[in-house]
Image: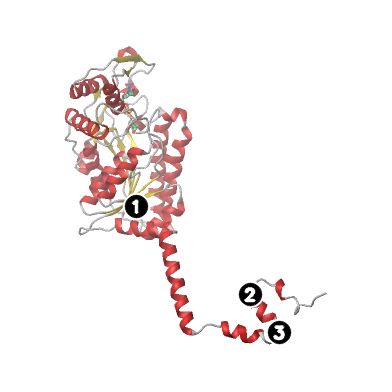
Amino acid sequence: MPTLEEEPLLLSSPSCIILRSSNPIMIPAFRRRFPSATTVFIWALVLLAFTASYITLVDPGSSVEKNVRSSAHVTRANGLSVLVTGAAGFIGSHVAIALKNRGDGVVGVDNFDNYYGRSLKETRRDLLELNGVYIVDGDINDSRLLSMLFDTVEFTHVMHLAAQVGVQYAVENPYAYVRSNVASLVTLLEQCKSAHPQPAFVWASSGSVYGVHNKVPYSETDRVDPPDTIYASTKRTGEEITHTYNRLHGLSITGLRFFTVYGPWGRPDMAYFSFVRNILQGEPITIYRAKNRVDPAREFIYIDDIVKGCVASLDTSGKSTGSGGLKNGSAPYRIFNLGNGSPVTVPALVAILEENLKMRVEKDVVDTCGDGDDSFAYVNISLAERELGYKPTTDLQTGLREFVKWYLWYYGKPLVEDSNV
Ligand SMILES: O=C(O)[C@H]1O[C@H](OP(=O)(O)OP(=O)(O)OC[C@H]2O[C@@H](n3ccc(=O)[nH]c3=O)[C@H](O)[C@@H]2O)[C@H](O)[C@@H](O)[C@H]1O
């Protein structure tokens, strides 16, 4: 049986083989391999260069941080530093560009979900990059990602626009709404709560919280229950959760009840968008009608007006008082209706689109069992006018003309069939 000294090959490292050898002529060989100071220096440089290129090329974290820092660069005096969630979305992309263009630092985050296809979101991302806004491709349910963002940038404000939208899809997939509109909201609020200093928080609630049996016009002080959809329930829950964070942790909160926002780069799942698609394709559209032949009406708000409301909300938000989770006095809690105070029926909307496109469309009118209350949105916007200087200026004819122009530019005419818009 070999002794340890006679069995050097059982050891894995070549240098150990040499050291453990009892053969005296191996010792000089080991010494010969001992590198000079110059060699060590050269190897150290090589190692350093290799590590640096590894970090840059392989570890995306550091290049993401670099982009985040550069995107957050503020170029005007007293500019804001804003994290925009849902930045590849319809409202988020417009708000992010508006902020960047006036010199605020803006960092976007978006999970590029597939609800209405990724392609339009990716084009919006390209547009944002051209305007100097970087979007992190990630999920705000990911608290490690949020920590990285907050460690990299001291945000003065969070503009939270990421959400699972769509009223109908909630019937099919309610979990998506709970995950995006409730769980993600809490993850983000937790991050804001712990930040030093805490940012002010402005976020997208919805006009749909007014529920089934509300009086019109809707005012912020009205009761808003019961919600008539899961989407509305999750937005209402968000209002309650943000209120709790405001009371417990001193976060400045502004909730914006958006009504039916439309315009260029809009959402393909919304009625006005799909109506244009159908008109151009020569396909019929469905118009829902409530009990007693009541035509549903909506407050359609042009995107530029909504952007002004969002920016004014950031500018007037007031400060959060807490720091690192501890409250130091009360902070503002605000809710605003962002509508325009003049409802339009769906058939009237369709007539404007037909006029713009100079085409007629076949209409399938479907009577629903709704009593009409939930189909009629009429909004009191006086609070937003007073506190935010909010004043929508784009009428539906003008706004839809702009939308149609954009649609024809973006998709071309005749429309190429493409479900992944
Ligand atoms: O936060 C919100 O408040 C929501 O606003 C928007 O919801 P809504 O105002 O309901 O818009 P939208 O679907 O465009 O339907 C408009 C009208 O057309 C009618 N409608 C719809 C489709 C159709 O085929 N026919 C039809 O008549 C329909 O019955 C309705 O009367 C967003 O879509 C939603 O994601 C969410 O952001």
Ligand 1 in which quarter = top left
Residue 375 spot, x, y in % from top left: 32, 23
Q: What residue type is labelled 3?
A: Asn
Above/below status of 68 relative to 35: above
Tell how many labels.
Answer: 3
Q: How far apart are marks 3 and 2 (CA)?
A: 15 Å
Q: Tag 3, which secondary structure?
A: loop
Q: Tag 1, which secondary structure?
A: loop
Q: In this view, does 184 lie to the left or right of 197?
A: right
Q: What residue type is labelled 2?
A: Pro
Would you call the spot at circle 3 few (<14 residues within 10 Å), some (14-19), or many (20 or more)?
A: few
> Residue beneath label 1, please?
330
Residue 27 spot, x, y in % from top left: 64, 86
Q: Tag 2, which secondary structure?
A: helix
Residue 359 spot, x, y in % from top left: 21, 19
Above/below status of 95 relative to 41: above
For image coordinates 36% across by 56% down, the residue present is 198
Whether residue 330 is visible here, answered yes or no, is: yes
Callout 1: CB less than 8 Å from ligand 1: no
> Residue beneath label 3, please?
23
- If you read the primary sequence from the N terminus, does the residue marked by circle 3 or circle 2 appear first? 2
For marks 2 and 1, give the one nearer the viewer.
2
- If you read the primary sequence from the N terminus, does the residue marked by circle 1 or circle 3 appear first? 3
Q: Distance between the residues labelled 2 and 1?
A: 68 Å
Q: What residue type is labelled 1?
A: Ser
